[in-house]
Structure formats: structure tokens, C-alpha cells
Image (cartoon, rainbow, N blue to C red):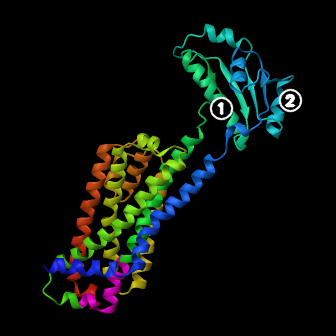
Amino acid sequence: MKLIALMKKEFRRFFHDPRLIVTMLIPGLIIYLIYSILGDALWSKEQDTYSYKAYVAGESRLCEMINTAFGSDEFLIPAADEETARKEVEEGKADALIVFPQGFDEAVNAYVPSPGAKAPQIKIYYRAADTQSSAFYAAVTGILSAYEDSIANKFDIAADNFSSDSEIVGSVLGGMLPFLVVIFIFAACMSITLESVAGEKERGTLATILITSAKRSHVALGKVIPLSCISAIGATSSFLGVALSMPKLMGMNVGGFIGSVGFLGYFLLFLLILSVVPLIVSLVSVVSTYSKSVKEASAYTSVLMIITMVLSIVSTFVSGIGNWVVAIPVLNAVVCMQGVLTGSFSLWQSLVSVAVNIAFTALLVFAIAKMLSSERVMFGT
């Protein structure tokens, strides 16, 4: 019964302070606004407004296919001199130069795909930093790649590893968004946990609770459980911000995006976020219990937040992280969320990560109970 009373006290403190409620709702709103605006900016440009100037060197029946795709029999301009045309592309006077080697069509017809056999190659010169030139390259690559697939890959396109806009956005989104969600959750947990633990310790109200017959484990749980539930409001807000803004950011309708991520992906994403909440609350509570004041606790927690940021951002740029990552709390959730967002998630890794985060939360709650029993920690004696 004393545990219930302690939990009610924390819930009452939160729900009677509108500022704390707003703090929990702001992260999701910020995510939604930022990524919705970014998505509108990325996908509002119509590609058909471009007026391309593209040269072609060499001859191939594919020229007719490209001309037809762009709506003009004279779309591709024959290059009088390949070197001059290439220089125009480099200087921004033209968008691209497509080079077909001599006898390309005959070589394609004679080519038999086999190990070690080099396929005929088309070269495309363009400027990746120029939006219009890149758009032309993406369009032509799509046309040629579709035709290549229809004839059993009998030729290659130079630099054919160029990614489309949606793939680039998806890769960046999968890398950065989990990092941002974790940081928003961390900030939300800090805003309520520091005041609840270090604040009460500084004011002496925590000492009043400790002189009662309440078990130290109940006091620890009476802090962590309600604070986790309250922080889960912020986690839910962040999750909804992600779920509602991602279709716009990916240039897709809501139904299409849900289909690409899948309901299982959304469920795992939400589960991973919820597993991080009590872990961060417990971690901040440990620091707050050890600290003598809110100011001291805030300084220590800021260091923890920086460490979390570094670990999360490193996972964005380091590829090939092994299965060992499931053993590292918080980082495991970030990596698994990245997998969900990029469509390469592992179900067992996600579930194990959730279990590991819960296990670490239990260990931290146990540590808090032990610290509450220590007079040196609580009263500095």
C-alpha cells in the first residue's frame, strides 16, 4: 500500500503542473513539424519543369528510347566533339553527356553474361552537385536500367550505384531519426526526474520519506514506475511525431509508407522506444540520488546525455555493427530502430534488445534502493 501511495504522489505532482505536461508533448510536435516541412521542401519540386540539355556521343538504338521518354525525337543533341561536350557539362553549360562505345548495339547482342566476361558499358557524365543534372542522370539511369533488366543485363552503366532521392532520404532518415528520438526522450526524462529525485533530496522531503517504515525498494519503485509512465507520454509523442511525419518526408502517402514499414515494424519501433524510457529514467534517478542538488545532478546527467549522443550518432556512420550491439543498452535500441526504418530489421535482435534494456532497468532500480539505504550517499556522512 505504501508503494501505491508513493506512486500516487508522483502522479499527482505531474498532473497538477501543466508545464510538465507540455514538456512531454513538445518532442513529438517538434519532430512532426520539422520533418513535415522538410518533406514538403524535398518533394514539392516538379521534375518536369526542368529544361534539359544533354549530349550524346556514339550511336545506339537506345537513343530513340531516351528521346521518346523525354517527349522529343531530337531531345539528345549529337556531340560534334566528345571532349568539347564533356567540357560543357563540367562548366554547367549542359546537363549531361551520354557516351555509347563504337559498335555498342552489336556488342550487346553478342554478349553472353558469364563470370569474368566484361559487359559493354555506357558512360554518363554529369554534375552530382547540380540538382538539374542529377535529376537528369537519375531519370536516364532509370530508363536504361529498366531496359537492361529486360534483356538479361547485357550492358553496364558507369556509376550505376547512384541512389534515388527516396533512397537517400530513407538512408539519412534511418540513421538520424532514432538518434533524435532517443535524445528527445532523454531530455524529457531529465526534465521530470531531476526535480523528483534530486529536488526532493535537496529540499529534505526525500529524507522524510526514508525515516518511515517504507522499504527502500518500494521508494525506488515509487519513483521509477510513475516517472517512467509519465515519460512514456513523451515517448508516445515522439513515436507519433515519427509515424505521422515520415510519409511526408519520404514523399509517399500514408498507406504506402505503412505498407513499406509494415505494422510489425511500427510495433517494434514503439516497443523499442518504450524499453528505453524506464532505462533512462532509472539511469537519471541513479545520478540524482547520488547528487546533493539539482544543479549537481543536471551537470552529471548532461555528461551522460553527451555520451548517449556520441554512441547513437556513431551507430549512424559505422556500418556492419555486429550482433554484439544487443548487449549495450540504449545503443541496441537505436541500431534496431535504424533497421526498422530502413527495412532491414532483425526480429530477434529487436526483442532481445527490449529484454536487455528491461534487465538493465531492474539492475538500476536495485542500485537506487541500495543508495537510498546508504547514509553516506543520502546525508553525506
For residue 84, which numbered disc appears in the image?
2
Q: Residue at x 41, y 40 (%)?
A: 259
- Mark positioned earlier in the residue sequence (1 or 2): 2
Stretch in magenta: 193-207
Q: How many residues crowd around disc 2 within 10 Å: few (fewer than 14), some, or many (20 or more)?
A: few
The answer to whether residue 86 is left or right of residue 131 is right
Quadrant of the rendered image containing residue 112? top right
Quadrant of the rendered image containing residue 126? top right
Q: How many residues crowd around disc 1 within 10 Å: few (fewer than 14), some, or many (20 or more)?
A: some
Is 365 part of what is drawn in magenta?
A: no
Identify the amino acid type marked 2: Thr
Q: How far separated are the C-alphas under marks 1 and 2? A: 24 Å
- Residue situated in front as seen by the camera: 262 or 191: 262
What residue does disc 1 label?
Answer: 139
Is 204 part of what is drawn in magenta?
A: yes
Q: Position of residue 102 (x, y in %)?
A: 74, 14
